[in-house]
Image (tube, rainbow, N blue to C red):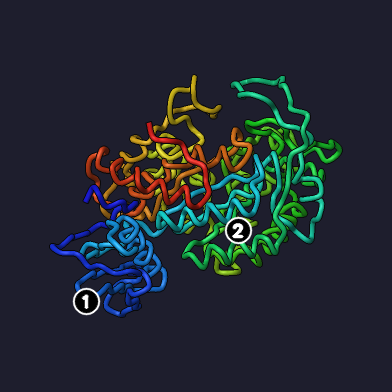
Amino acid sequence: MSDIAIVPAPRELTLHEGRWITADPVGEAVRDVVENLDATEYRIEITTEGARLTAGSEDALRHAETTYAQLVESAEDVEDGKVAVPLAHVADAPRFGWRGMMLDVARHFMPKDFVLKIIDVLALHRLNVLHFHLTDDQGWRVEIEAYPRLTEVGAWRAETMVGKMSHGQTEFEYDGTRHGGFYTKDELREIVAYAAERGITVVPEIDLPGHMQAAIAAYPELGNHPDQQLTVRQYWGISDDVLNVNDATVEFVKTVLREVLEIFPSQYVHLGGDECPSVQWAESEEARKRQAELGLDEPGQLQGWFTAQVAEVLAEEGRRLVGWDEMVETDCPKDAVIMAWRSAQRGVVAAKAGHEVVMAPCESVYFDYYQGDPETEPLAIGGNIPLEKVYDFDPIPAGLTDEEKALIVGTQCQIWTEYMEGPEQVGYMLLPRLSAFAERAWGSPKVSYDEFLARLRPHLSRIEKLGINYRPLD
């Protein structure tokens, strides 16, 4: 099936002798949701009588339509504008329920229309989650009516560092250009609706209690030095300026989350939890008092308490908390879904602790890493993840029992945008690595890398039609 340009490849595809020739095979296909298939399953039967698409749900039927459309697009042209479609049987279902991509719009804001194109790309690859990283030290991108300064101030930085940041660097060259932007509630609702029509869930992330310098710049009373006026962070790295642990700040976050939940109907809400230094809590008299009241041994344990307090809002609305893998170390809620990013081994730790896990290890699926020679590739944060390495990725880490493997509910690739100023750079770093990732997320049969490339080359024309940049194949 190497000449059939289906990405990701179905888990079962059988081609039969003969051809069914029609002018408009897509339009003539019969589509049905049936009861004898699981909600994620679909079938395609192409016979001399025509094409029939069946599925266990509307979402699965969308996947059937995507696969069928790719079969037709890969078909041979014949005379009079007709195409010759192979007689075929397809039986397919995804390996994982969470097949996602994270888009960071906090470091560099991305226009709404481009976000919609990203959703189209996800749908093309039968992915079903857009994890929307909306807040960070360098920008706040979601309108919150109760706190307008979050976007009036927090959505804009005066300038941005130039070049690559080195470890321990404290002095920077800046570009002198104001950068920012945010999405109104109506724009976000449009994004959510557009995604839902394509079977994709938008999972918002409000990263806390670290990565909050933009919010503290807007409302200094949220920080541990309220008499100090911060700016929205203009360079990368990890800020020591984290939220304080006062009752008023907890209520601030709860109010923000309530407004976020009004916009995003997703069952899951990501609360970050990564890279939260505790140095300011150790220095703060109020934080030390809170620590003593709670009987905690060290300031860093305040993070688990803070997360539990604000997560009450999610529980009230029947939503589930998602967090980066540091949360496992902070006594987070037992039903929290953990996103393992620091390594695959962090996913093992989370699963053994009884958490459901989304595998997102930086060594395999961080698409802000280089994908070729750093001397000739665009500036990136570091590392090297070429296309073949993505294709070789196995979302199920070694060292798990069968019961623990069942807790690996999905996988996700990441686009962090420190070094991506706009859509052209994002497209180049994302594609076609996303195509290889989609094969692993879906559970496509793993064959040779050369066979994958044979299917990928004609598939790139579909990406071109969506109007998104991509890195040419070597």
Q: Is residue 423 left or right of residue 48?
A: right
Q: What residue is rendered at 56% in x and 53% in y?
A: 270
- In the image, 317: left or right of 184? left
Tell which circle, 1 or 2, labels the residue nearer the N-terminal end.
Answer: 1
Percent position of residue 114, x then y: 59, 51
**Crowd tier of the residue under label 2, counting other residues whose Cα lies within 10 Å: few below 14, some 14–19, many 20 or above:** many
Query: Where, by quadrant of the figure, is residue 349 drawn?
Result: top left
Residue 46: x and y, percent?
Answer: 23, 69
Q: Where is mark 2, residue-wise?
A: 311
Residue 353 as seen in the image, left or right of residue 22: right
Residue 204 coordinates in the image, percent (x, y): 59, 56
Give the residue furthest to the left.
Answer: 17
Q: Residue furthest right?
A: 227
- In the displayed structure, 389 sits above or below 17; it is above
The residue depicted at 33 percent of the width and 48 percent of the height is 440
Q: How many marks?
A: 2
Residue contact between numbered discs 1 and 2, judged by CB atoms under 8 Å: no
Q: Residue at x 45, y 42 (%)?
A: 431
Where residue 265 appears, x then y in whole percent? 58, 67
Amino acid identity at mark 1 = Glu
Query: Which of the two marks, 1 or 2, is nearer to us in this view?
Result: 1
Question: Looking at the rendered structure, which numbered label has been put on residue 49?
Answer: 1
Helix, strand or loop for disc 1: loop
**Splitting the image into 4 quarters, where does residue 384 fall?**
top left
Report crowding for label 1: few under 14, some 14 to 19, many 20 or more residues within 10 A (C-alpha): few
Q: Amino acid at mark 2?
A: Ala
Question: Which residue is at the front of the view, 221 or 68?
Answer: 68
The residue closer to the viewer here, 143 or 465, is: 465
Q: Secondary structure at mark 2?
A: helix
Distance between the alpha carbons at the discs numbered 1 and 2: 55 Å
